[in-house]
């Protein structure tokens, strides 16, 4: 209830995000960016609620209420997933409506691949940022998250260069995964996301249980 009430005060943010989705959809014929961007922005909102909790020892006060540290961590993960999926659905609805107006019929494989990719990105984003936020707090976690993102980007760059040097066509590999083997890829990503989130949840619980106030 507290986090939902905090989101109600973000009307300007949601308005600006809605306008940006419409602009991206009108300018681009590919809905991938709009859906992915919206999903990740809603995931960031979860980090915002945690920053509010840290403000003026608010988390210390919250934990004096009949809420355990394990329950607090679980709520953040559930809230992050639910809000992000709602954002994904909202962005999908807007892009579908815009595509209908523009006379563009998006292939269902493209929609499915986009949603699956968003699921994996969302899982990784929550899995990485949650433990860092709980460990270092709202201020120091920004530097830590930046370092993790930089490391991830470097890893992707190295893999891309390795595939290029080895003569591997990444576009063909991705097309095979998301078109020819879509069902297997979807199950693999869902299972991977669930395992990563479960491991992250265990780490977050352990971090918060050891945290001193």
Image (cartoon, rainbow, N blue to C red):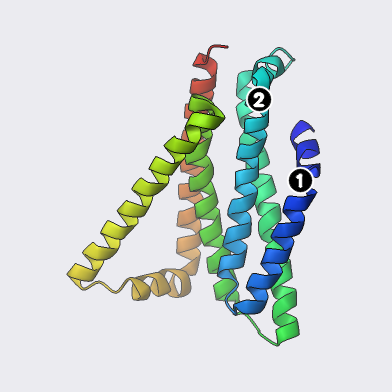
Residue under numbered circle 2 = 55
For residue 34, above or below residue 47: below
For residue 130, above or below residue 170: above
Give the residue drawn at x 25%, y 71%: 168
**In the image, 5: left or right of 151?**
right
Give the residue drawn at x 66%, y 53%: 85
**In the image, 53: left or right of 9?**
left
Residue 202: tell me if it is visible. no
**In the image, 179: left or right of 58?**
left
Of the numbered discs in the image, which one, if any, rests on residue 149? Answer: none
Give the residue drawn at x 39%, y 73%: 176
Give the residue drawn at x 43%, y 36%: 144
**In the image, 28: left or right of 196?**
right
Quarter of the image for residue 58 reads top right
Q: Looking at the image, which is closer to me, 124 or 188?
A: 124
Where does the N terminus fall, quadrant-wise? top right
Residue under numbered circle 1 = 10
Check disc 2 and report its element: helix, strand or loop.
helix
For residue 123, above or below residue 67: below
For residue 181, above or below residue 59: below
Q: Looking at the image, which is closer to me, 144 or 204?
A: 144
Q: Position of residue 5 (x, y in %)?
A: 80, 37
Check disc 1 and report its element: helix, strand or loop.
loop
Q: Position of residue 156 (x, y in %)?
A: 33, 57
Q: Position of residue 194 (x, y in %)?
A: 51, 44
Quarter of the image for residue 108 reads bottom right
Where does the C terminus fall, quadrant-wise? top right
Neighbours of disc 1 within 10 Å: few (<14), some (14-19), many (20+): few
């Amino acid at each position: 209830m507290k986090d939902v009430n905090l989101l109600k005060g973000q009307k300007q943010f949601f308005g600006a995000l809605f306008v940006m989705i419409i602009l991206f959809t009108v300018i681009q014929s590919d809905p991938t960016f709009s859906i992915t961007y919206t999903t990740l922005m809603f995931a960031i909102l979860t980090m915002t609620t945690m920053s509010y909790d840290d403000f003026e020892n608010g988390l210390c006060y919250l934990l004096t209420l009949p809420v355990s540290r394990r329950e607090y961590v679980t709520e953040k993960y559930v809230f992050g997933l639910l809000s992000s999926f709602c954002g994904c659905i909202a962005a999908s609805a807007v892009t579908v409506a815009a595509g209908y107006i523009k006379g563009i019929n998006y292939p269902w494989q493209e929609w499915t691949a986009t949603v699956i990719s968003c699921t994996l990105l969302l899982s990784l984003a929550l899995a990485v940022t949650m433990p860092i936020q709980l460990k270092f707090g709202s201020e120091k976690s920004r530097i830590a998250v930046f370092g993790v993102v930089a490391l991830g980007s470097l890893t992707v760059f190295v893999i891309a260069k390795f595939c290029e040097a080895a003569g591997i066509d990444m576009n063909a590999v991705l097309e095979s995964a998301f078109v020819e083997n879509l069902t297997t890829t979807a199950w693999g990503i869902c299972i991977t996301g669930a395992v990563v989130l479960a491991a992250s949840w265990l780490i977050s619980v352990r971090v918060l249980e050891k945290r001193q106030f």
